Amino acid sequence: MKSLVASFEPSVTIVSEIISTIGEALEAGQRFRSQEFLKTVETRYELMNPEEKKKFKECIKSPNGQKIIADFAVAVATTPSIVVNSALALLYANDPDFPFNSHEVERFVSSTLGLTDRKVSFLLSLNKVEQVKTKSLYPAYSISEENFVTLGDIIDVDELFIYVSDFQSRGLLLMETNQQKAFGFAEANENIKWSAKYCISDTQHRFISLLRKASEYVA
């Protein structure tokens, strides 16, 4: 029996060490993201005038302010993107360029939850694509084999379709509103035309502008 127990001890020790390492890594990651969030809040606070600072202090001490920071804390802890966390900090600190109402804040938080900086960088590049000249409910854009290279080396072709679809499901982009078939699928090495189409509403433009400003804070 003793020899049997002894045979399990090395495995148990290794598992315990792995669990401890994972716990430390998670704690360190959350601490780092929280620090980055607070850095942006501090930077924004220093730019406030005396009246804005007074209102901000009153807000964070209020019940509603306490609820907001609790909601933001969950988002910061579960979102790897430093840019998104910086954007949340700008919203929390009432950045004057983005006076979102409570519904827009909720929508932004939920739509960016879990994003990585690589995905955010790709989203920002999609916003720079030249608008398609066509009648559409919202401004329309198209990525094809002709202009894909303008996105740089952020993603591969297959990721283009995956990420555009993901952004649309999140509400950060819209489906192309004029065509039933918004995607043209093809292998990357085939000599065939393909495209991924999407639209961006005014609110989504504001969301992307917020992320762009946040990216400058953490650059």
Image: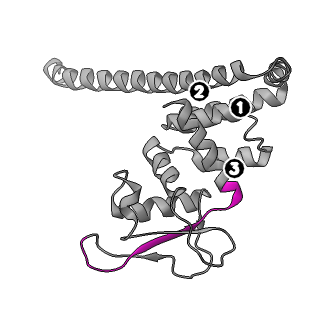
Q: Tell me which residue sits at (76%, 31%) in the image.
A: 67
Please tell me which residue lies in front, 7 or 184: 184
Q: In this picture, is 210 found above or below 48?
A: below
**CA separation in Å, label 1 and label 2:** 10 Å
Q: Which residues are magenta?
A: 189-204
Residue to which mark 2 is pinned: 37
What amino acid is labelled 2 in the image? Phe
**On residue 92, which mark appears?**
1
- Secondary structure at numbered mark 1: helix
Please tell me which residue lies in front, 208 or 79: 208
Q: Is residue 112 left or right of residue 71?
A: left
**Contact? badges 3 and 1 (CB < 8 Å):** no
Residue to which mark 3 is pinned: 107
**Contact? badges 3 and 2 (CB < 8 Å):** no
Image quadrant where one finds the N terminus: top left
Q: Is residue 54 visible?
A: yes
48 inside magenta stretch = no
What amino acid is labelled 1 in the image? Tyr
Q: Tell me which residue sits at (17%, 17%) in the image.
A: 2
Question: Which-is-in-front pick, marks 3 and 1?
Answer: 1
Q: In this picture, is 200 found above or below 178?
A: above
Q: Residues within 10 Å of mark 2 (few under 14, many from 20)?
A: many
Q: In this picture, is 88 found above or below 127?
A: above
Q: Tell me which residue sits at (58%, 43%) in the image.
A: 211
Residue 60 horizontal/vertical position (percent):
78, 23
Nearest to N terminus: mark 3 or mark 1? 1
